[in-house]
Image (spheres, coloured by chain):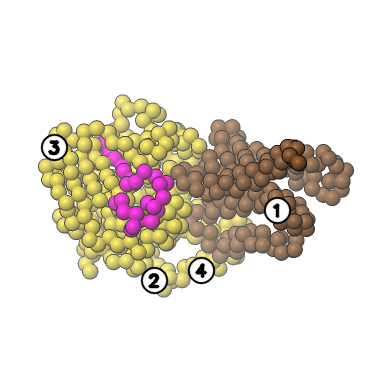
Amino acid sequence: MRAAVFAVALVPFARLVSGFLTDDLTANPIEFITRQTGYWALVLLVASLAVTPIRRLTGWNDIIKLRRLIGLLAFFYATLHLVTWIVLDKFFDLDIMIEDVVKRRFITIGMLTWVILVPLALTSTTNTIRRLGRKWQTLHRLAYVAGITGVIHFWWLVKADVFEPQMFAAVLAVLFGVRIWWTWRTRTPSPS
Amino acid sequence: MLITNAPDIRSSEITPQGLYLRRREFISGAAAVAAGLALTGPFTGQADAQTAGPGKLARLATIKKSGYGAGEKLNSYDDITSYNNFYEFGTDKDEPAVQSRAFTTKPWKVTVEGLVNKPGDYDLDEFIKPFALEERIYRMRCVEAWSMVIPWVGIPLADIVKRLDPTPAAKFIEFYTLKDPTRMPGQRRNVLPWPYVEGLRLDEAMHPLAILAVGLYGEVLPNQNGAPLRLVVPWKYGFKGIKSIVKIRFVDKQPRNTWQDMAPNEYGFYANVNPSVDHPRWSQKSERRLGEFRPRPTEMFNGYGDQVASLYTGLNLRSNY
């Protein structure tokens, strides 16, 4: 199961690599790579947030075993996305990058999203999970924040057509709605 | 068909067609090698320096060569026709080429109205018949900080305006794109307020650099590039270049253009290329010329300052972005 998820999630990456080698990444390869890596980072991030709701709704308990892998793949694409920006887009021009991060809110929040993901990725070894215990749970709630800031990053960068960011936001809203509903239900005493 | 003026490139520089058609093979082979050595794969795909199209569409007869853009390396026909901002056919860059395949541009009517002595509904062929077609190789700088070099074929807008004969009260021209969601699938969603509208000051429209284009690479305009008639104003950001024009109106007040309506803090009426005025969400200091790896600095008025700067003496270009 894990191998299947891994293989499927690496398809976009493989397509970027093969497209790169055959000069088939549109007329603007850097923009294409940036968009693709960002898009898949967001898809996987949202997918990782969907694991628990799916588990509870379907009773498919083993799905939890996929969550770490999905989260790490999201981090992999987010890092590719950032590296594309630093290396291919800005070509290590520190002044321009700093100006972008400070002045442009969609870049600020995108950078923030990646920064949030770093400690989550670093604390995902079995050992750390065991060692941190409940603290790990609390720390990894930051994934919700990263999901929100990631979608805002996407939303703020588009010029006019917000359809895709809206779809992401809708999925996030459903996932959060489900969780809030469950929390509310368990807190309300049942009438009987 | 007849081409009276020889292209001013040496025949030795023209890539043989067979080789040209196989260029992707060559490029991908070269890219595979190059990629092994360095990160240059997709950036070897630079255009062949020729202005003959691939023969997909009808060739335009009698094109006058012009001195504009001499020495500039052209973007390939593929680049120019596969990477388009034309929201009437979808908001992704690769969508217009696909979504506009069934779009028909014959017959095409251009309505001329407003403060003008020769208003009317003109059939397109009749509308352009009196004028000589010219090739104009222009840089195109998109507001999104990428650029291309495109060999347009068109008519100086000034010639058209003179013939239409605006009244002395006319100070601006407004252009309208076709609005027809049955033919332009992108218009079925309200991404922008349709139809797309653009405008120029009359003196800008009379500037010799401004043209109405009907072709590129010596052939009629592909649908995704704004067939059959579009505006090209090379010192302004690309979004000023309104496509598939069906109406030209002469007015006395500065028109509201579509992107200004959408986001007035981001897009203005003038939209002159200006590296010192950032878009609120990105810098305009540099641009990526498609086909090149390193960004290049953006030039004031897209490098056409010598010709056009005098249009704007005394105008604050920071507030009139």
Tell me the tag on residue A102: none
* Quadrant occupied by the C terminus of chain B: top left
Give the chain letter at badge 4: B
Magenta span includes B198: yes
Magenta span includes B67: no
* Residue under numbered circle 2: B17
* Residue under numbered circle 3: B167
Which residue does the image show at 55% across and 35% down from the upper left? A104
The extreme front residue here reads A192
Mark before the other along the chain sequence, 2 or 4:
2
Tell me the tag on residue A57: 1
Q: CA–CA distance between discs 1 and 4?
A: 54 Å
Which is nearer the eye, A53 or B162? A53
Q: CA–CA distance between discs 3 and 1?
A: 71 Å
Give the chain letter at badge 2: B
- SS category of the residue bearing label 4: helix
Decide if residue B201 is on the left or right side of residue A170: left
Which residue does the image show at 84% across and 50% down from the upper left? A126
Which span is picked out in magenta?
Answer: B178-205
Instruction: Identify the image quadrant of residue B51.
Output: bottom left
* Residue under numbered circle 4: B26
Q: CA–CA distance between discs 1 and 2?
A: 61 Å
Q: What is the three-letter code of the residue carrying label 1?
A: Leu
- SS category of the residue bearing label 2: helix
Q: CA–CA distance between discs 3 and 4?
A: 56 Å
> Mark 2 touching mark 4, by CB under 8 A?
no
Which is nearer the eye, B12 or A104? A104
Query: Which chain is yellow in the rendering?
Result: B
How many residues crowd mark 1 within 10 Å: few (<14), some (14–19), many (20+)?
few
The picture places residue B170, in percent across and down from the top left corner, at: 18, 35
